[in-house]
Amino acid sequence: MQIQDAQKAVDIWIREHGVRYFNELTNMAQLTEEVGEVARIIARRFGEQSSKESDKNKDLGEELADVIFVVLCLANQTGINLQEAFDKKLDLKTKRDHERHQDNSKLKQ
């Protein structure tokens, strides 16, 4: 699925099931909450923090999908074509960072 298709799917879902978009500030708070849930899973599963019993069945993929959903909501309600923005950013990073990363001795194994 292309990003623009995902944006359309979210917009349709909001209109059919969500009544309306939360305002931008609410969605920003939601995004922060969802990123926090991803961080919690990563810290416990891959980091040094101890897991709680309630953390063991958390689904990282589901939480990452929550982040994407809210980002798509924010893009839709602020008029951002995220496909276009992403493609532009990827092109910029490719041109700007290729040699920088290739020459980074910290990344060589």
Image: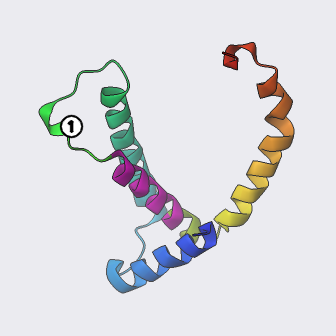
Q: Residue at x 54, y 71 (%)?
A: 6
Q: Main secondary structure of the magenta part?
A: helix
Q: Nearer the viewer, residue 61 or 17?
A: 61
- Decide: is 34 above or below 77: above
Considering the numbered disc 1 on the image, is that residue within a helix, a strand or a loop?
Answer: helix
Does the magenta run of residues contain 65? yes
Q: Taking 10 as reference, is 57 left or right? A: left
- Residue at horizontal 21%, vertical 27%? 51
Which quadrant of the structure image shows residue 21? bottom left
Q: Quadrant of residue 58?
A: top left
Furthest-left residue in this view:
53
Percent x, y of residue 11: 49, 78
Residue beneath the point at 44% across and 66% down: 23
Q: Which residues are magenta?
A: 60-73
Question: Closest to the observer: 102 or 47?
Answer: 102
Horizontal and vertical percent position of residue 46: 37, 27
Judging by the rendered image, the residue that carries numbered circle 1 is 55
Quadrant in the picture for the C terminus: top right
Q: Quadrant of residue 76?
A: bottom right
The answer to whether one can see residue 92 in this image is: yes
* Residue at figure coordinates x 61%, y 66% from the top left: 3
As for residue 97 lying within the magenta part, the answer is no
